[in-house]
Amino acid sequence: MKTLTTHHSPLIMNKLPVIAIFDVGKTNKKLLLFDQQYNLVYEESKKLQETKDEDGFACEDVASLTDWVKNSSSKILSDERFDIKAVNFSAYGASFVYLDDKGEVILPLYNYLKPYPKKLQDQFYKTYGGESAVAKQTASPVLGNLNSGMQLYRIKYEKPELFEKIKHALHLPQYLSYILSSALNTDITSIGSHTNLWHFQQNNYHKWVKQEGILEKFPPLLPCTKVAAHIQNSIAIGAGLHDSSAALIPYLSSFQEPFILLSTGTWCISLNPFNHSQLSDYELDQDCLCYISYEGKPVKASRLFAGYEHEQQVKRLAEHFNKPLDYYSTVTADTELLQKTKQGKEKLRKNDQTAMVSQSAFAKRDLKDFKSYEEAYHQLIADIILQQTRSTNIVLKGTRVKKIFVDGGFGNNSIYMQLLALAFPEIEIYAASVAQATSMGAALAIHKEWNPLPVPAGMVNLKQYKVGDPLNTVV
């Protein structure tokens, strides 16, 4: 399925100077154009069918993705309405594309959800000092294939002949850049984000990367504020960024007072750029890690797979209550139902200190206990918020954060936002209307390379949610 949206003024007769951003998520692939004031003037969205790796596990279809990038860029470059000044890329992490010595893709883009062989994982950590030591050094818990460096380690020991054929390993954002620029680069926001590759205390690659012969497969690091190449003489091509780091850029550009960005999508990630303490064993056990900002600074983050769970549970709700799949989008906050979920939340609070789990309590709830879809959906969001509160609190502690900005899908969900405000009564809760923060961040990263105008003020529009009586009130 493909949607096409164009935002532009009919008064503009000359070509409009813009930057094109390819924003590749696991579910949606987007092409967006921003003008020099960072107004969104064009948007195209596409969903691509997955393929399967050699073990039958679902994964990104690199060939289809490559074709889409080539075709979409060709079409937009020939569009008479726009003067493309630059192109940049953001994409999800834990995603390597492997190239041979001819620059051709070999091997699948393995899915980070694929289970990791325990024997191999044990071998790795035993060799390099144990799970706790490596996790602290690389600022990432033990996550199997989500530690993307471990994917290369697995290939080396399970498919040594194919490992030898890998000339270049590119994280997905840098591969997207390579499609258009033919330039080979590595980016710190990708290398530094839960990969097991970067030693945070030494600010360099971890020793195992060199010892295992992996370092030589990484192209040189390029600052993500620089461009990888120019095409057609003048169009600047960025090297791409990890999507979570990109989403933070509009906020770092707009706010100096300490804040948390709760970036919601498939993953709900609480990013605290103002928490610089070293990760503890407890934080690592609770799935906390560090990203690296576009400026090369650590950003402590806790992650929750809440968007994915929401996606799975609304399918279950739709089937049980015989409603359309997207019926949840019509459900608005109800005072009585919120009070019921609050009572349920108080009962669940006894388990607050348990380790983070992959699903909320809702997965085990009997839908027959709910009188309506609306009641069940309120409880789903309440259960997700209980987990979200635990997750966000991990990176919140010890900092002077007074604001939480919610960006992405859940920021548009009034039930979620009102329950979040109830969960954090001492903190100002805002829904961020930068619907395309990731894409805008990728554009801002190379601002000086394409845009002669100053970065505009007020790029982030906010809607505050306050605890009202008895409901939260949007102000």
Image: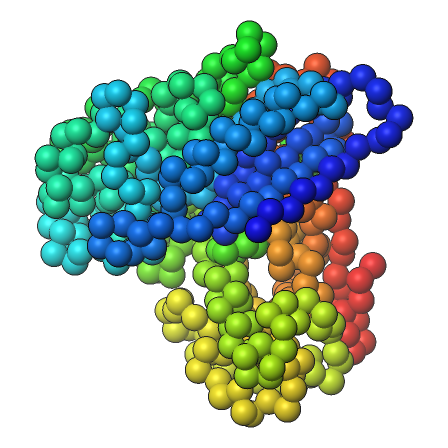
Residue at (29, 42) in percent of width and height:
108
Q: Residue at x 30, y 46 (%)?
A: 110
For this rendering, which residue is in front, 329 or 456? 329
Residue located farthest toward the right when viewing the structure as drawn:
11
The coloring applied to the image is rainbow
Residue at x-position 38% and y-position 61%: 286
135 displayed left or right of 349 = left
Q: Residue at x 83, y 59 (%)?
A: 475
Residue 214 visible at all: yes
The quadrant holding residue 34 is: top right
Q: Could you tell me how many numbered marks the image carries?
A: 0
Give how far across and how far down residue 106 sits, in percent.
Answer: 26, 34
For this orientation, the residue located farthest to the top is: 233
Q: Is residue 349 visible?
A: no
* Side (left or right) of 458 relative to 343: right
Please tell me which residue lies in front, 226 or 331: 331
Image x and y of residue 115, in percent: 26, 58
Q: Position of residue 358 (x, y in %)?
A: 40, 67
Tell me where residue 15 appears, x and y as whole percent: 76, 18
103, above or below 390, in the image: above
Q: With respect to residue 317, does 391 lie above or below?
A: above
In-image side of 300 versus 35 (left or right)? left
**Above or below, comparing residue 71 to residue 416 in the picture:** above
Q: Is residue 194 above or below residue 239?
A: below
Q: Which quadrant of the figure has residue 277?
A: top left
